[in-house]
Image (cartoon, rainbow, N blue to C red):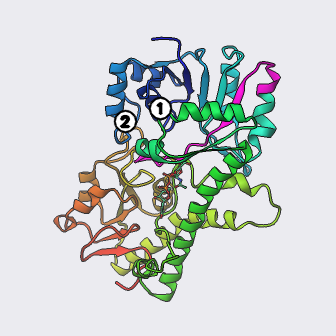
Amino acid sequence: MKTPSVCVVGLGYIGLPTALLLAQAGNFVVGFDTDERKISSLKKKTLPFHENGLEDLFLKVQSKKTFEATAEIQAADTFIIAVPTPQSNGTADLKYILSALELMKPVVKDGDTIVLESTVGPRDCIDHILPIIHSWQKKIGFGHCPERAIPGNTLREMVTNDRIIGSEDVTDGEKIAKLYRTFVKGEVFLTTTTIAAACKVMENTFRAVNIALANEFVQIADALQFNVWEAIGLANHHPRVSIHSPGPGVGGHCIPIDPWFFTHSLTQPTLIEHALRINESMPEYVMEQLKILIKRYHLSKPTVGILGYAYKKNVDDPRESPAESLKNIVAKEFSVMVTDPFVDAKKFHLQSQEEVLKKSDVLILVTDHDVYKEIDFTKYRNITCVLDTRHILKGPFVHYLGDTTQ
Ligand code: SAJ
């Protein structure tokens, strides 16, 4: 392989697909990760996680010989940082970004460019990241291009979504745009790092607040005894209304976390913080509804089965999943089992679907995996009722969150 033109730092759900798309477009790419097991599995041609279409892309890129995984950071013309940014006291914790910068410091040279894809707060590039790069006293370009692709449809969205590139220097911004245009078919917009970061956090905040509203509607519907699903469906026929779907809570590494990056900037209580708390409280609310059902069916010491551990439908990612908090809440009072067809059962102590179906008295559907629609619950005489938090099942003993009318 030639000298790499791009080094992607962090081969997770965003870094790896980005690296492979760049490589497929003809750029010579090295992918670096501090997790040596991930690198050795990639070297053995095994992907560390599932994402639609990723395996095919990986195979294609192997035949082109434009991608290499490495446990040692390497010189390149452009470095793309795609590492996690957890939340800490209402700001983005930059520790992984700072250690990535520390690792690349010895290999960057005059004329190189660093692109940050990880989500950060609006002022983080100006206040914390650029001062570090400037302190190296080299001519390094910098831009912030926050990732926007949705897990489950990552590859398609990485190609078709519009991208926002923030840079304090127009030439750097244009250079980065040129690289991204090798695989991005959407429009590429140039702006400042602050605006780029603000857009990204606003996008996920918009979603978090709207989901919280739907989750509050569930509680209102239960209190006033109407079917929230029918009401939302009909309300969404209004040309300017698009209510999100209620559910057992919000998971993933983005929507429950990124909106916090805004909250430290105001001293008064924010709508955003209240919305995040509503979403966080949903597993408790599901437990309350479960207890109502258990009482209604006169179940004593029931075994509760949880269907779905991933944070959302048809993915294998359990990060911040509401299923984990629900499991812990239920376990305080009842015996509980969890199953998920996509998530690593050994790593997360999950049971097989058949075992959960055969041994549970009551089920809670947490994740709306399509395969759950195929289960014939009537085959299992032990199952008294199912609490469907996503409104995807049908059947005589299925009860829905936000519908006490059944
Ligand atoms: N959810 C609901 N109701 C809804 C929609 C989602 O309860 O109406 C739940 C899901 O089940 C899941 C969580 O919210 O637990 C988040 O799922 P999601 O599909 O809304 O979003 P993510 O976290 O998979 O990806 C988001 C996306 N952001 C936006 O749509 C604004 C994606 O484009 C970002 O790239 C990603 O965050 C990120 O990495 O920031």
Name which quarter of the figure residue 76 lies in.
top right
Q: Position of residue 184 (x, y in %)?
A: 49, 39
Looking at the image, which residue is at 74% across and 50% down?
89
Whether residue 366 appears in this view of the structure is: yes
Name which quarter of the figure residue 230 lies in.
bottom left
Instruction: Residue type at mark 2: give it.
Output: Leu
Instruction: Residue type at mark 1: give it.
Output: Leu
- Name the residue beneath numbered marker 1: 16
Magenta region, mostly helix, strand or loop? loop
Q: Report the span colored magenta.
A: 133-153
**Residue 150 falls inside the magenta stretch:** yes
Is residue 143 depicted above or below 242 in this figure? Answer: above
Determine crowd level at label 2: few under 14, some 14-19, many 20+ residues with C-alpha closer than 10 A: some
Q: Position of residue 94 (x, y in %)?
A: 70, 37
Looking at the image, which residue is at 61% across and 32% down?
176
Residue 54: mark: 2
